[in-house]
Amino acid sequence: AQSVTQLDSHVSVSEGTPVLLRCNYSSSYSPSLFWYVQHPNKGLQLLLKYTSAATLVKGINGFEAEFKKSETSFHLTKPSAHMSDAAEYFCVVTNSGGYQKVTFGTGTKLQVIP
Amino acid sequence: GAVVSQHPSRVICKSGTSVKIECRSLDFQATTMFWYRQFPKKSLMLMATSNEGSKATYEQGVEKDKFLINHASLTLSTLTVTSAHPEDSSFYICSAAGLAGEQYFGPGTRLTVT
């Protein structure tokens, strides 16, 4: 069984303050984990990925995520929010072997207040 | 990064007609492509996994005779919505799998059935 839970459907932060988007997963196998971002009326873009290498993963646009097996978490963080970060963020898990089973989280909408 | 295109970006068709959507990986070869459907303010719903040269694997509840998928080459997968009805109106997104299980998404196709 495999599942992804994004704990917050909406997150609102002020520009310049830290961002935390939470993601918990369950997987019967060694998972690969990803964060994607979707801006309004746009396609999805890969932010970062964890594939059993370093547990702290750095992605594009200053985002990073830490894989914590003991907590089954893969939270996305950024030290300082920018207006352009306002978007929908999806946490995704796949089982080992890559793309045999893909599960999307329900998404977290990030609002950045000027 | 890897680029995936979709064509058309928008299509309007009459009820009962069929519509074909193309998904192309422009600068890499993709053994596996995915087709998703995204409802307004909802997460992506995986419809099927398409492997080059073999039959697509459909998710439970997705009618394979209605949503025909062909993955004839390593850079092209097509989704044909047959005998479209208004309830098929949606945003359809494809992705192509990278070597580490990450997905590169197309920009999506907005289908409206009148």
Image: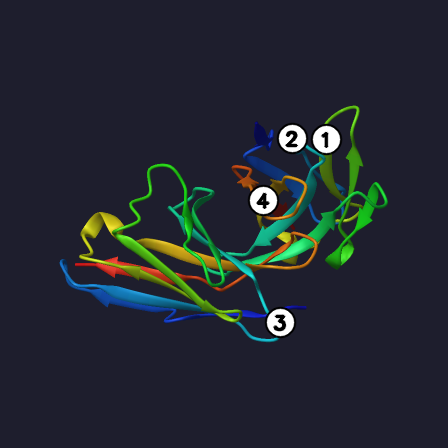
Dot 2: few (<14), some (14–19), or many (≥20) neighbours within 10 Å? Answer: many
Label 1 close to label 4 by CB (< 8 Å): no
Which residue matches tag 3? B28
Nearer to the camera, A2 or A81:
A2
Quarter of the image where one finds residue B54: bottom left
Q: Amino acid at mark 3?
A: Phe
Residue B18: x %, y % from top left: 21, 63
**What amino acid type should be assigned to the residue bearing mark 2?**
Tyr
Where residue A77 sits, quadrant-wise, is top right
Question: Would you call the spot at circle 1 few (<14 residues within 10 Å), some (14-19), or many (20 or more)?
Answer: many
- Please name the residue that numbered disc 4 is placed on: A90
The answer to whether marks 2 and 4 mark residues whose Cβ atoms lie closer than 8 Å is no
Residue designated by label 1: A73
Q: Secondary structure at mark 4?
A: strand
Give me the chain letter of mark 2: A
Q: Nearer the viewer, mark 1 or mark 3?
A: 3
Residue B71 percent across, percent down from the top left: 44, 64
- Marks 1,2: beta carbons within 8 A: yes
Labels 3 and 2 touching (C-beta < 8 A):
no
Q: Residue at the spot x=13%, y=59% of the render?
A: B16
Give how far apart the Cα atoms at labels 1 and 4 are: 14 Å
Q: Which of the two labelled residues, at mark 1 and mark 2, occupies the earlier sequence position?
A: 2
Name the outermost residue toward the top. A70
**Neighbour class for label 4 at 10 Å: few (<14), some, many (≥20)?**
many
